[in-house]
Image (cartoon, helix red, strand yellow):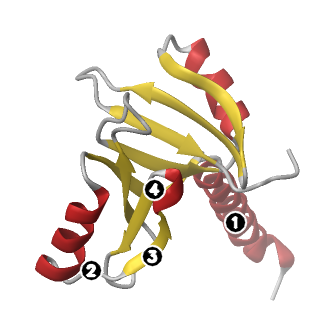
Amino acid sequence: MKMHIWLPWILVIALWMNNNKLKHRVMNTNKILCIDNFFLPANNLQESRRFYANTLGLGVHFDFSEKGLLAFRVGNDEAAIILKDSSRFPDARPAILLQVSDVQELYATLSGKGVPFTKKPYRINTGWAAELQDPAGNVIGITDYDGEK
């Protein structure tokens, strides 16, 4: 066959492939990766432990009661329910924690859009974290797991 017959099809396929690469790149720029954990305040960790373990039947994910934190596994999900002892964390409120690719980068982007942060980026054992509020006042934490940054 002559090349001039195939040339338009080759161009269409090349453009389609390039468009798909572009879409893939745009989709990969999504900075929010997944739900990381749910935080709930607890007035009495031992009473809460009995409720979550015995009543709801959830397994302990980790127990840092001495530091005021107790986490429960929910099925096979990585996200856990983490209870924060209100006596150790008096400002503890229900919050959702989202894992993001880069806390500092997302903080800069969202701050530039006027999103109010209640806690600017700060170091944690596994990387960085920050907190913001949605328009209804709900706490949304963001965290990354790159301790090298």
For the C terminus, give its image quadrant: top right
Q: Residue at x 72, y 32 (%)?
A: 104
- In which image quadrant can residue 103 be found? top right
Measured Cα–Cα span from mark 2 to mark 3: 9 Å
Give the residue pinned by disc 3: 61
For disc 1, the marked residue is 17
Label 4 belongs to which residue?
A: 69
Which quadrant would residue 133 be assigned to in this image? top left
Q: Is residue 146 visible?
A: yes
Q: Nearer the viewer, residue 125 or 20?
A: 125
Rendered image: mark on residue 58: 2
Look at the picture and state if 75 lies above or below 81. below
| Among numbered discs 4 and 3, the one appearing first in the sequence | 3
Q: Can you tell which of label 4 and label 1 is closer to the viewer?
A: 4
Of marks 4 and 2, which one's residue comes earlier in the chain? 2
Of labels 1 and 2, the one closer to you: 2
Discs 1, 3 touching: Cβ within 8 Å: no
Q: Position of residue 28 (x, y in %)?
A: 64, 55
- Tell me: 73 left or right of 27: left
Q: Name the spot of residue 66 as percent of width and height, x first.
A: 51, 58
Q: Is residue 77 visible?
A: no
Query: Which kind of residue does numbered mark 4 sit on?
Result: Leu
Secondary element at image label 3 = strand
Describe the element under mark 2 as helix, strand or loop: loop
Name which quarter of the figure residue 1 lies in: bottom right
Dot 1 surroundings within 10 Å: few (below 14), some, or many (20 or more)? few
Separation of residues labelled 1 and 3 (CA atoms):
44 Å
Mark before the other along the chain sequence, 4 or 1: 1
Q: Nearer the viewer, mark 4 or mark 2?
A: 4
